[in-house]
Image: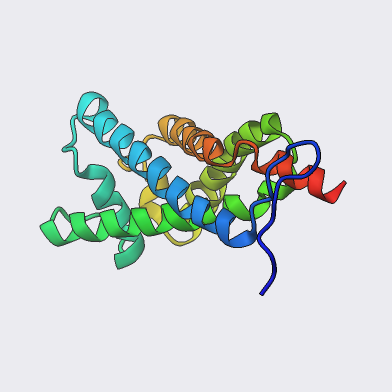
Amino acid sequence: MPAAPTADAQGRQPVAGLGDRLGRGVVAGIFAGVIFLFAQMGWAVENLAKPAVAPMLDMSTVFNNVDVPAATASNVVIGLVTHLVLSMLFGIAFAVIVPLLRTNLFVLLGGVVFGVLLYVLNIQILGRIAFEWFTNPAGPPQVFELFIHGVFGLLLAPFFIGVGLRYSRRSA
């Protein structure tokens, strides 16, 4: 069994391993995903005159593979579970790329870029190919979706502040 890592002569902490980063990704994804969902729910109520569960109904179309969401209790649960699972997976994906970002500033900027790229991939590309509700004029508002996806990525970043820096020092 390998010895536990210790701080080096300059007092730097041991580098987080892949398992630690993936765990951070899961937690970060849940955290950012819940904030993302609450923001979408508030936006639906305040600006779209839709019920608070509208974002979960939208997400249920991904699981159910239907063109228009159906307002049922089971679809609210399906949408919530789908949203949380995808949020965790996206958090894990961000965790995988953190070592490439190297500095805390790049982790923050990378988070925003990551969120915007999620929007492009999930809404603009996959939405047009397989999940048409997301690009339907009656569906989610595109400007808000772009903004909130960027916020999602930014909310992932604090879970990795210092991690990218530790990785760059290790590889140097």
Q: Nearer the viewer, residue 45 or 25?
A: 25
Residue sitting at 68 percent across and 43 percent down? 13
Q: In the image, is 58 to the left or to the right of 13?
A: left
Residue 168 appears at what percent x and percent y?
79, 44
> Please, which residue is most extreme toward the right here?
172
Q: Is residue 68 visible?
A: no
Can you say whether 102 is above or below 76 in the image? above
> Please, which residue is most extreme toward the top here?
46
Q: Nearer the viewer, residue 168 or 2?
A: 2
Residue sitting at 66 percent across and 75 percent down? 1
Residue 43 appears at what percent x and percent y?
28, 29
Residue sitting at 19 percent across and 54 percent down? 76
Residue 120 appears at what percent x and percent y?
56, 45
Can you say whether 119 is above or below 106 in the image? below
Residue sitting at 41 percent across and 30 percent down? 144
Count of numbered marks: 0
